Image (spheres, rainbow, N blue to C red):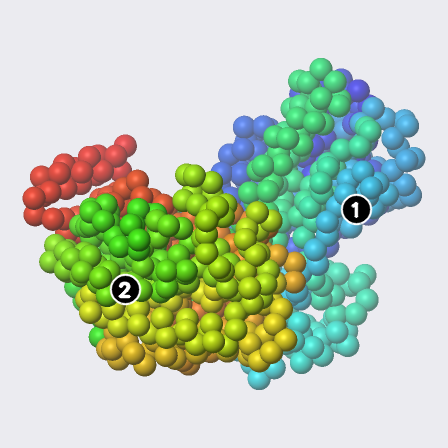
Amino acid sequence: MRIACLGGGPAGLYFAISMKLRSPGAEVTIFERNKSDDTFGWGVVLSDQTLENLRGNDPISADMIQSHFAYWDDLSVIIGGAHEKSTGHGFCGIGRMRLLLILQERARQLGVTLKFATEVACVDDLKGDYDVVVACDGLNSKTRERYQEAFRPVVNTRANKFVWLGTHQKFNDAFTFIFEKTDNGSLWAHAYQFDADTATFIVETDEATWKNYGFGKMSQQESIAVCEEIFKDHLGGQSLMTNANHVRGSAWINFPRVLCEKWHHENIVLLGDAAATAHFSIGSGTKLAMESAMALADLLHNEPTIDAAFIKYETDRRAQVLRIQSAALNSLEWFENIHRYLDFHPVQFNYSQVTRSQRISHENLRLRDPKWLEGAERWFQGHDGPVRSPIFAGLKLRDMELENRVVVAPMSQYRAMDGAITDWHLVHYGERAKGGAGLIVTEALAVTPNGRATLGDAGLYDDKQIEGWYRIASFVHAEGGAKICAQLGHAGPRAATKQPWNGDNLPLTDGWPLIAASDIPWGEASALPKMATMADLSEVTAAFVAAANRAKAAGFDMLELHAAAGGLLGSFLSPVTNKRGDSFGGSVDNRLRFPLEVVGAVRSAWPSGKPLSLRFCAHDWLEGGLTAADAVAYAKAFAAAGVDIQVITTGETRATSSPQFGRMYQTPFSDQIRNEAKVSTMAVGNIYEADHANSILMAGRADLVAVGRPHLTDPYWTNREAAKIGDIQQAWPAPYALGAQQLNTLMARDRQI
């Protein structure tokens, strides 16, 4: 087999080595436009696990690489004079130039032909002469550009600016992140040692700060001088250096995030940055390239045809690459939104920074550095009692004190009769009251009969409905430490539908008239609502107030207003569903007007010592829907009107909403609103482990965490998760003590295995 590698970086060299190890008779030629000793980076970061993978593939080059590694186990964060350090991370660095020379030497040993300073004008010049052309020609790949209709690349140029520098200042004890606030804005450095004398020093900032400094108009040396002044307290008198003197201007760039829909075309296959890029903040670009190189060589050697090898390579590697890219995206977005976190306490800032990619979770960090995490948990707890995980820290909202931060999310039961609850509800809520959560939120309680989504919806529109809820609230208060919150809502355009098991969101054949912000049906099969009149809005506001008074009589500790998921209040907030031409439609302020009237009226009726929450949609997942700026503006307005905590959800504005589901998929919206609007939030959405909840809380992404579906199948989710993470302080009902003892014993055994 004759193989041409277009590009002599780590991807091309390691593929050539891997191919020759498997197929010594293969003819492999590398074409590299630069000279053998040219390089335009500083250090390369690899994990201990990556090194083991390399050793399994080629022990000889792995040993050569390892002999030049600079090792560190710690991550350091320096901000505002504070220095936080955590350990157990296991990374190593090597100079990019050293790595290339090692790989070049090994490739020559195996019989690879290396052609440096050789410009290949077009990949077409090679594909006819070789069986396979491996295009590892970097993030600005000419091959990808030449066949862009086949590869269908998406290149997303990210917002932040960065410049890749080096220094002789030592950072050999830790991978170090340095954050500096200046009059022109904030800048930060990613610094790590890669040999005995030299460290990488990447300076990053947002575009506004970059413009304020005028970096774009500077030469490289002028830019470096400014960076040296900004970071002088951390450079020990050493200078910063560039090895990109061939680049005009200041050498600041934006990171291009590359994804390709397809990785192969005819006999050409993409490898490394040509196929996909990973942000430098997680140090996985070289890892991805070298591990993909191993996989491609394996398949070309083992599969019956080249095309079969290409197909399997793309199928097998894409999932792994996407996982790394997803983590890298989380990381780069954290840095792009760093202004949210710069005022955090240094302990919380460090935790947020370390866990930013979501590859390191709370319990994983405990394995890495239990001492640091124990101190962080003690800080979060805010007192000197026994240290517990963040979910078991208390929270006070007005006069209501919660024992912990776990919330049983509202989950519709559809088992009410004419709006009145039954014994089903007593058992349902009673079981969850015994399960350990700090707060239980009821299903949406309709404030009018016509505000019910289904005939099985519960309500608080009649005084006769108070007794059933009083019984439940009394049980909750008597049998556990939980508080209970009534969620009040009006289904609006989603009203008068069948129960889900009889036809989800399908209208009743004998339903009732619907109202909404505008005469827009929720879905194609939905009934058409009428645009609510001023009289309708006055009646609805009065109904919310009456329901709040009934909730007070029933003994609820807290109220939540439902303004999400396509309901009546939510239909006013979204520009997709609010097309009104009066003072209740159009601008953000106008769309807010009616929901704020309801909030104000309910807050006035609800006891001042009891908290009020509101659930609203921060993203419609629809074209022309809510913007991030809209959501932040809404949150500020609701807080000013007396809302104490806001439940941040997304989607369901219309039936065509298409959320990007995933683990904790709505938490980023809670993070943004909490830390930009400076309000308290509750995170919700595919949170199903204590590990998730602890990470969310400790990183400052929410103040409470709502867990829904897991509580449907396990009313004791909170207590079971406590046992799972080794928290034996969590209280169980006295009659269940023996069961709790057995569970704690079994979970302790599982943790030891």
Give x and y (percent) for residue 232.
Answer: 56, 76
Residue at 7% of width from left, 44% of height from top? Answer: 735
Circles 1 and 2: CB atoms closer than 8 Å = no
Left/right of residue 144 with respect to residue 362 in the rendered view:
right
Residue at 83% of width from left, 24% of height from top? Answer: 131
Q: Secondary structure at mark 2?
A: loop
Most foreground residue, 36 or 23: 23
Image: 399 above or below 275: below
Q: Earlier in the sequence, mark 1 or mark 2?
A: 1
Give x and y (percent) for residue 262.
Answer: 73, 37
Left/right of residue 711 with respect to residue 11 in the rendered view:
left
- Quarter occupied by residue 148: top right
Give x and y (percent) for residue 516.
Answer: 52, 64
Mark 2, residue position: 462
Mark 1, residue position: 141
Quadrant location of the N terminus in the rendered image: top right
Most foreground residue, 531 or 592: 531
Quick one: which residue is furthest to the front in this view?
A: 510
Q: Secondary structure at mark 1?
A: loop
